[in-house]
Image: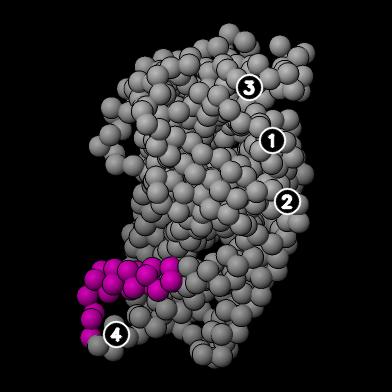
Amino acid sequence: MSHMPNPPTTMLSISGVHTYYGNIEALKGIDVEINHGEIVTLIGANGAGKTTLLMTVCGTPQAARGHITFEGKDITRMPTHEIVTKGIAQSPEGRRIFPGMTVFENIQMGAMSCDPEYFDQDYTRVTELFPILKERQNQRAGTLSGGEQQMLAIGRAMMSRPRLLLLDEPSLGLAPLIVKQIFEVIAEINQTDNVTVMLVEQNAYHALRLAHRGYVLVNGKIAMSGPGSELLERPEIRAAYLEGGR
Amino acid sequence: MEYFIQQLINGVTLGSIYGLIAIGYTMVYGIIGMINFAHGDVFMIGAFISLIMFLVLGLIGITWIPFAILLVLIVTMILTSVYGWAVERLAYRPLRKSFRLAPLISAIGMSIFLQNYVQLLQGARVKPIQPIVEGGITLIQSDTFVVTISYLQIIIVLATFLLMSIFAYIISSTSLGRSQRACEQDQLMASLLGINVDRTISLTFVMGAALASVASVLFVLYYGVIDFYIGFHAGIKAFTAAVLGGIGSLPGAMLGGLLIGLIETFWSAYFSIEYKDVAAFSILVLVLIFRPTGLLGKPEIEKV
């Protein structure tokens, strides 16, 4: 899609990762590489392990086997609350905004892990990306619409000044117009703010068009990978994730 | 009328002490959804620490009362907080990932342990201390009845009011308070944002214990008699107060404390002192029948 940094350097490397929920093996040896400046998407059916992979990157649950390195540092065993200080932020599945707090307090929560001196600057940037958050700043976050909540979740994640942003199904349950708007902001964050993005989506068509590269996850394993545009052309992808879905 | 006003003063004083203890129950419930049954006993530990401190200060000849009370308050707060912290660290944190009832049972065990620990170390007999703050102000003097408010009652109500204000400020406007509220709503998300959830929970226990310890110092000054069992009584009352006000709600805990204090005092004053607990708990039952979430509690909405 857009220009690629040359030559690509690895930012996040996931190698041979196995993750369990109790006795259930949710990830069965995952290898994923994400380079600086990329948007990489992870598509797959329900229960394939997409969310688990994002959560494993954040150390909750931790990988039982394998290694995750971020900018050359092994973060496999790092506690969740320290991982964000290394520059990884997540807007998780279901958005998980704090419904009892105001929009502004949610934003403040996003900035918990970094120096308060950047707060004003970052908040200005986030409200540039999502002007509605500024309008709603004193409102309780639980009263926002689904789309606004998603914007808040992404805005909150951006407040921690991430270099890698993990997005879990930002389009889920949203009207097509809002989805388009959110995908535009993701592209903008990637290009202007120089944030690498790892995007989990069921909306494979949008995701693959946006992403530089994609991985297809089937039953806890990577089944296919390649540039987004190439994956879009593959008949098995079209059959499994696109036909009927749009 | 004079009698009524006097009882009102007494009730508010008692209610302040209950309210301070109730905060500890309600905060811990809010953040980890568990009733810390050992909280009353942490209060009792605080009472013993403050009693011993008063005696020690008397022995070494620190007799300027305001300074002595301040010193006792500080030392008691620190030591009691350590107990509160240790209870969480030893008895609850290892069970965090366990089934829901496990920490509850562990809490009851911790409560029994603390009672026996103090009983063994300090003996089972009541420990008296002579009045430290004496005197008061006569508010109304009629032919039949004199309404007074003692200096101690003023101190208790003022100290409670001051602490509650500081506390409300911490919860609503500091980053620590925000972290606590975040952990209350969604621990996983809080940790994704860089909040050390274990540390925040520990701090919640420390804050609850610190407030209980202030209540214990005031209790020692007010009643002048303690034993190893006061934690159970005060604890169950404060717990009732927290439930009455709406468990998980801070203003609710304070309101519940005041109400329980007033109900008990008025019942003792106008009816019979033997049945004051019956009165307090009956009100609780009535409130829970008509408002199961307590007076200021938010109804729990199941997310679909």
Q: Amino acid at mark 4?
A: Gly
Near mark 4 (Cα within 10 A), the count class, few <14, some 14-19 or many ≥20, is few
Q: Amino acid at mark 3?
A: Leu
Near mark 1 (Cα within 10 A), the count class, few <14, some 14-19 or many ≥20, is few
Depth check, front residue: B118 or B147: B118
Are tags 3 and 1 found on a single chain? yes
Main structural element of the magenta stretch: helix, strand or loop?
helix
Residue of label 3: A231
Q: Amino acid at mark 2?
A: Glu
Which comes sooner in the sequence, label 2 or label 1? Answer: 2
Q: Which residues are magenta?
A: B61-82
Q: In x, y percent, where is residue B283?
A: 70, 51
Q: In x, y percent, where is residue A183?
A: 52, 17
Q: Is residue A174 above or below residue A161?
A: above
Magenta stretch encompasses residue A106? no
* Residue at the image position 65 percent from the left and 16 percent from the top: A233
Q: In x, y percent, where is residue A177?
A: 58, 8
Are tags 3 and 4 found on a single chain? no
- Mark 4 → mark 2, Cα distance in angstroms: 66 Å
Identify the subunit bearing mark 3: A
- Mark 2 → mark 1, Cα distance in angstroms: 17 Å
Can residue B166 be spotted in the picture?
yes
Residue of label 4: B58
Quadrant of the rendering where the C terminus of chain B is positioned: top right
Depth check, front residue: A155 or A1: A1
- Mark 3 → mark 1, Cα distance in angstroms: 12 Å
Mark closer to the observer (3, 2): 3
Mark 1–mark 4 CB contact (< 8 Å): no
Mark closer to the observer (3, 4): 3
Residue of label 2: A25
Residue of label 1: A223
Mark 3–mark 1 CB contact (< 8 Å): no
